Amino acid sequence: MSQSDPYLTAHSLLGRLHFLLLLFSDSLYVRIYFSLSSLLFTIELFTLPNGLLTSNTYTHEITKLLTTTDSLR
C-alpha cells in the first residue's frame, strides 16, 4: 500500500464528517450549509494540483481496481 498525502487524507475525513453531520441534522439551514461544504470539499479534492485526478498514485490505484474488477467478470 502506498503512502497517501496527509492533506488529501485530512480533506477526505473532513468531507466524510460533513456528510455525517448532514445526515443527522434536523435544521434545514444546517443541511444546506453542510451539503454545500461537502460538495466544495469533493470538488477541491479532485482539482488540487496533487489531487485525486492528477496524482499518479491515485490513478494507479484506480487503474488497478478497474483491471481487478474486469478480470472478475
Image (tube, grey):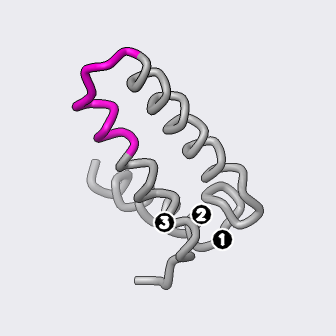
Of 2 and 34, the residue lying toward us = 34
- Left or right, residue 51 beside residue 12: right
The CA distance from mark 1 to mark 2 is 5 Å
The disc at residue 21 is: none
The CA distance from mark 1 to mark 3 is 19 Å
**First in residue order: circle 2 vs circle 3:** 3
Q: Which residue is mark 2?
A: 59
* The image quarter in which residue 13 lies: bottom left
Image point (71%, 66%), residue name: 50
Task: Spot the residue most to the right.
Answer: 49
Residue 12 at x, y percent in the picture: 46, 57
Q: Which residue is mark 1?
A: 56
Query: Label 3 is placed on what type of residue?
Result: Ala
Residue 19 to residue 64: above or below: above
Residue 19 is one of the magenta-drawn residues: yes
The disc at residue 10 is: 3
Residue stretch rendered in magenta on the structure: 18-28
Of 27 and 17, the residue lying toward us = 27
Which quadrant: the N terminus? bottom left
Residue 29 at x, y percent in the picture: 43, 18
* The image quarter in which residue 71 lies: bottom left
The CA distance from mark 2 to mark 3 is 19 Å
Callout 1 touching callout 2 (CB < 8 Å): yes
Residue 59 at x, y percent in the picture: 59, 63
Q: Residues within 10 Å of mark 2 (few under 14, many from 20)?
A: few
